[in-house]
Image: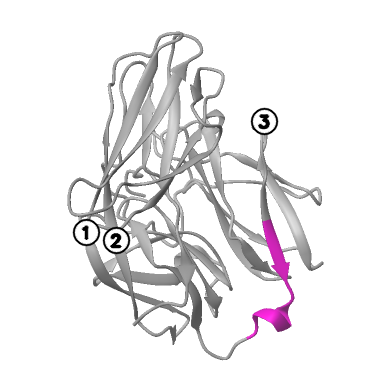
Amino acid sequence: MAAPRQFFFAVCLIAGSFGLPLAAQQKPPARAPAVPAPDAPAPSAARILLLPRRIVSGERATLAVLGVNGRLTPGATITFSNGDRLKTDATGRALFVAPLNAGVIYASIEGRPGRVSTIILTPAEASSPTMEISSAPRVTSLTDRFELFGKGFCGDADANQVTIADRGALVLASSPVSLVVLPPIELPPGPAKVKVSCAKRDAPEFALLFVGLDLQADSSPLKRGEHRMLTVRVSGTMEKISLEARNLAPEVAELVGGNPVRRFSSGGEGENVSQFEVIGRKNGAFLISIRLVPTLGRPQP
């Protein structure tokens, strides 16, 4: 498996330095290696659970876990509200079979606060002779995951093929009715055509607008009581873009306005920017993830 890339746009100030999405992750092999890569994050680093928001009763699904630096995290234990438990494999993902009872189920990373919900649909609700995409974001980030909803996808993430501008993308999590996709590297900002296929089924091609997010922030260590501004510059569109900042280390810093905080960028022909403020609660490293908030709708050709 290639070196994982950071899977969310984040300012990650750890020991006085911050990291942005850099190295690319290529599509992992269908069969994962027996052991994690030597530099893979430890299970204790697990912070973000990617669970398809819709799964299908009795059908396969794939989830993924990301660490504090946004990398896929092997060996992380996931617990479900029905008592099921599983661990992510060497790719930082886990294939499982959805429970038989339709309804809502919750999952969480063992030892971490918070939980993620997913809706279990009946096979009849998910049945379709062809692949279709019913909902997709209108705008998404070049360096962040986005979600597609529809029918006819494969629950095994690697069985799905997603290309963006004829470049292969990585499917992080999946079910027959939901895909969580990471765009390919070196994709320029602007509109791009997206193709999805699985098991000899193809969805109609559609377009997404991809925008760049560039962080400007002081990378020196944060001190107790210090106020610091985080500025995000948006490229690829003059539209106002909704961004969400989430504090992943609230014991170290306070995110002004709550947790999470949503703000629109300025938009217009000049600089398209948005700002967030943090206040140090104690000296040390803090972690704030900043993501574009997608607006879902029918995919456009």
Residue 162 higher or lower than 4, as above or below: below
- Element carrying mark 2: strand
Tag 3: Cα neighbours inside 10 Å, few (<14), some, or many (≥20)?
A: few
Residue 140 in picture, x, y percent from top left: 36, 59
Residue 267 higher or lower than 260, as above or below: below
Q: Does residue 73 show up? A: no
Residue 91 in picture, x, y percent from top left: 46, 49
Asked whether residue 122 is drawn in magenta, I would say yes
The answer to which of 13 and 236 lies nearer the viewer is 236
User: Which label sits on residue 111?
Assistant: 3
| Residue under label 1 | 189
Identified by mark 1, the residue type is Pro
Read off the magenta span.
118-127
In front: label 3 or label 1: 1
Distance between mark 1 and mark 2 Cα atoms: 5 Å
Disc 1, disc 2: CB below 8 Å?
yes
- Element carrying mark 3: loop
- Of the numbered discs 1 and 2, the one sitting upstream in the chain is 1
Q: In this view, does 23 lie to the left or right of 126?
A: left
